Amino acid sequence: MAEHIAAAAILEQGWRVGMAQQDSVDLLAWRGDRFLRVQVKGANMNQPNRYQFQLGSGSRKKKKPSIENYDVVALVGIYHRRVLFLPVEKVQQFTKRLKAKRFEDPSIETDSWNYTMEIIDGRLG
């Protein structure tokens, strides 16, 4: 479900999207000749009014993601059916906890997508 919610949010940003189903890439987003690899992390509220996202990868020793793995992480608040996008270089922890109230903001997807694109544009020069 989280991948479909994230795909719909990316489409609303004016990008095309396809399911990838690879080891660390769930979606491919593209516009023109520009492609982005997207990892989707979905969560239900595990405590009252909180989401907890597991961001590390690996079965034994967890590793933080890097730009070699993917470009964008899509944090999907399943109950709210909204997405917070982050550029992978801003993922600094293995677990991210967010208040559910953050996903009530109707501009969360557009604002976080634009922020993510600014960071990626800076990376690409």
Image (cartoon, rainbow, N blue to C red):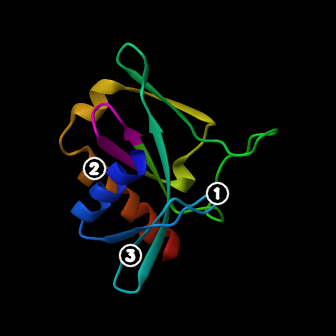
The Cα–Cα distance between marks 1 and 2, rounded to whole angstroms, is 22 Å
Reading the chain from its start, which is encountered first: label 1 or label 3? 3
User: Residue at 28% across / 57% down in the picture?
Assistant: 8
Question: Relative to 105, is 107 above or below?
Answer: below
Q: Mark 1: give few (<14), some (14-19) or many (20+) Cα within 10 Å.
A: some
Q: How many numbered discs? A: 3
Report helix, strand or loop for mark 1. loop
Task: Tell me the number on the disc at residue 30.
Answer: 3
As helix, strand or loop, the secondary structure at mark 2 comes to: helix
> What residue is shown with label 2?
109
Can you give x and y, in whole percent of width and height, for residue 29 in the image?
A: 40, 70
Separation of disc 1 and disc 3 at Cα?
20 Å
Magenta segment boundaries in residue numbering: 76-85
Q: Residue furthest left?
A: 106
**Does label 1 or label 2 sit earlier along the sequence?**
1
Q: Amino acid at mark 3?
A: Trp
Rendering quarter of residue 102: top left
Nearer the observer, disc 3 or disc 2?
3
